[in-house]
Amino acid sequence: MSDNGAARRVVADEEQSEAFKKGLARRNRIAGPAGAQRRRMLQAVSPDLEKLLIEHCWGTILERPGLGERERELITLGVLITLGRDRETITHFNGALNVGVTKDELVELLIQLSVYAGVPAMIAGAGLLADVLQARGELDLSDGPSA
């Protein structure tokens, strides 16, 4: 018999490592409210998954010097689109826009990907970008060209 209460336990603030605290602040700044749902899902499955993501990825790897948040988001998007990781791509399109990457820069990323990842990856990425921009109120697809 498993103890769901223990499996869902959230680490108290005083128990969180410095990397976890920095990672959570970074994740909140970049991912915004969309990251909160992902965090709840990971906590529900296992606090260890949430800790890995927040502490290691966001709080250790992404805290390294040498690249800024904009560059890291562009690199991340290139990899995610190439691998076809749509759910994460949506998160990081929002993150890129949240840290100042422009729509025009994201279009250039898609054009660059068409050469190295293929046109199908570019088209899939363009569709996800359109969805994100529309959800943010930055793109209106209602009167667009028909097929």
Image (cartoon, rainbow, N blue to C red):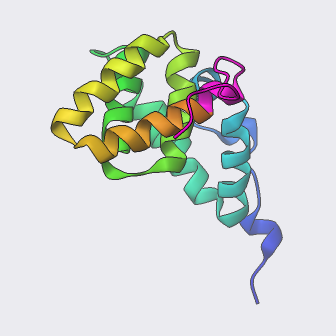
| Residue found at the far left of this picture | 116
Is 69 situated left or right of 53 in this image? left
Is 46 situated left or right of 121 in this image? right
Question: Does 22 appear above or below 128?
Answer: above
Which residue occupies 58% across, 17% down?
A: 98
Question: Does 42 appear above or below 29?
Answer: below
Residue 131 in sight here? yes
Question: Where is residue 84 drawn, in percent x and y?
Answer: 38, 52
| Residue found at the far bottom of this picture | 1
Question: Where is residue 22 drawn, in percent x and y?
Answer: 56, 25
Inspect the magenta stretch and tell me whether residue 146 lies in it: yes
Inspect the magenta stretch and tell me whether residue 122 lies in it: no
Question: Does 1 appear above or below 130?
Answer: below
Closest to the observer: 80 or 24? 80
Closest to the observer: 140 or 20? 140
Tell me the magenta residue range. Answer: 132-147
| Total marks placed | 0
Closest to the observer: 60 or 145? 145
Q: Main secondary structure of the magenta part?
A: loop
Question: Where is residue 52 drawn, in percent x and y?
Answer: 50, 50
Is 126 situated left or right of 145 in this image? left
Residue 21 in sight here? no
Which residue occupies 42% across, 38% down?
A: 125
Location of residue 7 (image quadrant): bottom right
Question: Where is residue 1 drawn, in percent x and y?
Answer: 76, 90
Which residue occupies 43% across, 51% down?
A: 85
Which residue occupies 70% across, 56% down?
A: 41
